């Protein structure tokens, strides 16, 4: 089972791969 942090980081990586503009938070 993945930790919440790992899942969040993976989700952010996937989003950035599709839309780099999401890097700005």
Image: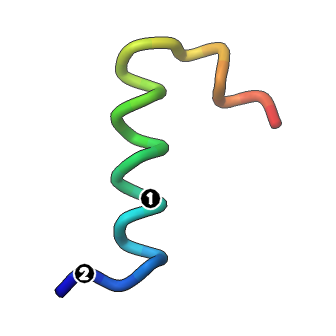
Q: Quadrant of residue 4?
A: bottom left
Q: Residue at x 34, y 53 (%)?
A: 10
Q: Is residue 23 left or right of residue 10?
A: right
What secondary structure is found at the residue carrying circle 1? helix
Q: Please state the horizontal and vertical placement of residue 6, each as a whole percent of the image.
A: 36, 72
Image quarter in which the C terminus is found: top right
Which mark's residue is nearer the viewer, 2 or 1? 2
- Badge 2 or badge 1: first in the primary sequence: 2
Image quarter in which the N terminus is found: bottom left
- Between the residue at mark 2 and the residue at mark 1, the CA separation in whole angstroms equals 11 Å
Residue sitting farthest toward the left: 1
Residue sitting farthest toward the right: 25
Numbered-mark total: 2
- Report the front residue among 5 and 23: 5
Q: Residue at x 47, y 61 (%)?
A: 8
Q: Quadrant of residue 20?
A: top right
What secondary structure is found at the residue carrying circle 2? loop
Say which residue label 2 marks. Answer: 2
Relative to 3, is 20 above or below?
above
Say which residue label 1 marks. Answer: 9
How crowded is the residue under tag 2: few (<14 C-alpha within 10 Å), some, or many (20+)? Answer: few
Q: Residue at x 36, y 65 (%)?
A: 7
Relative to 1, is 19 above or below?
above
Q: Is residue 2 left or right of residue 16?
A: left
How crowded is the residue under tag 1: few (<14 C-alpha within 10 Å), some, or many (20+)? Answer: few
Q: Please state the horizontal and vertical placement of residue 11, each as a whole percent of the image.
A: 40, 47
Relative to 23, is 3 above or below?
below
Relative to 11, is 24 above or below?
above
């Amino acid at each position: 089972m993945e930790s919440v942090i790992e899942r969040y980081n993976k989700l952010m990586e996937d989003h950035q791969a599709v839309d780099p503009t999401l890097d700005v938070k």
